[in-house]
Amino acid sequence: MNEFRTRTDQSASWSVFLIFLRLGLTSFGGPIAHLGYFHHEFVSRRRWLSERSYADLVALCQFLPGPASSQVGIALGLSRAGYMGAIAAWAGFTLPSAIALILFALGISSYAEVMPAGVLQGLKVAAVAVVAHAVWGMARSLCTDTMRITMMALAAIVALLAPPLWGQIGIIMVAALLGLWLFKPARDATLDALPVAVSRRAGILCLVLFFVLLAGLPVLAQLVQTHVIAVVDAFFRAGSLVFGGGHVVLPLLQAQVVPSGWVSNDAFLAGYGAAQAVPGPLFTFAAFLGATMNASAPAWIIGLICLLAIFAPSFLLVIGVLPFWERLRHHQRTRAALAGVNVAVVGLLLAALYQPVWTSAIYRPQDFGLALIALVALMFWKLSPWLVVICSGVAGWLLSIAA
């Protein structure tokens, strides 16, 4: 019986890895687009969880520091196949871009030599369609009356006008308070459970370990004063203290690695450019920075250490919080607050659809036309996002030739 269970768990973990590997190879467009890919794959297509449960999970990960899309992926893998599923989801989604950036650091001088002109533009346009499709689907499910639609619109407006970090956190907090005041979920409302094979004791242990490492690594770095410990400390803090996703972490990383002499500013900017051209989470930029450093250990090992250090807080926080979150989200007052937060999350996605997704991709009528075709392919032809992404990249290349 135990052998059968072990084989079943391994099979589930392998399945999770393959699904996320495909997403890791095709998910261009940044964290907001990644949430759109996840929505299509796990809500619309595979039915792993409901629209509301997915929105609740996204809302939770918006509260936590670190890369929200990667944390959603870790949580989905954890719910599907336990701890190994969480690792499998992260590895599948993260390793393609991490390997590409380490190879770039080891000698690829320009990603433009590998990627034909126009392909990157086509991939950005595909991200517009993916995000628009996700916003439409979530809005139809979560913004069901005049009050919710109004809150969504106001959240989008404030998100566009306010500073990204504190504006996002403030919007979510205010939306939670408004949800407590305005919304009255039915007492018999049922939610499909998000299975989490994590005990409360394990959750508490992970949260304690997170805070111990956050406080202890700087002390250890001062006492030991070795390059590896200093690097782990810098990248763990970067993954622990940044809200708002990958782009927000860049100033903090630059302040850590450039003045210290670990990475030159030119190399930092070149790596950031390369990170825009690969799929998957932007936090894999840490792998490039590690592989660029002059260290006694092989470059790819330092790159892997930096990658693990910056994502470690996400694992500890997701595993630590989920056991309590699953219980809290069933309480009536928590559901009322979540209703407000979910509406705000749709507003934040709507704002992100404009800035930076739309503004960084739609420059010409041809771009708008390609985005419209991609959106129709997703919404009405029911094509898979990865196929739409590939076709958009090819179309972008053809448009660049014709120009």
Image: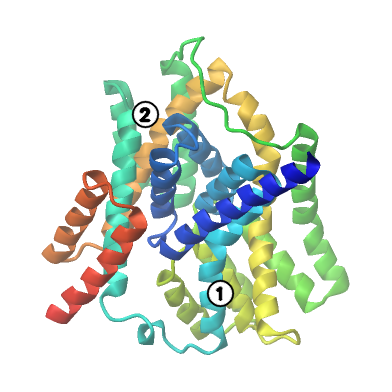
Q: Amino acid at mark 2?
A: Leu
- The residue under the point 61% across, 40% down is 79
Q: Quadrant of the C terminus?
A: bottom left
Mark 2 neighbour class, 10 Å CA radius: few under 14, some 14 to 19, many 20 or more? many
Where 316 falls versus 25 (above or below)? above
Q: Quadrant of the N terminus?
A: top right
Q: Amino acid at mark 1?
A: Ile
* In-front residue for pair 195/175: 195
Query: SS class of the residue under badge 2?
Result: helix
Where 212 falls versus 141 (above or below)? below
Where 296 falls versus 181 (above or below)? below
199 left or right of 178 in image: right
Residue hosting label 2: 142
213 left or right of 339 in image: right
- Could one spot residue 242 in this view of the protein? no
232 left or right of 174 in image: right
Q: CA distance from mark 1 to mark 2?
A: 38 Å
- x and y percentages locating residue 280 in the rendered image: 48, 62
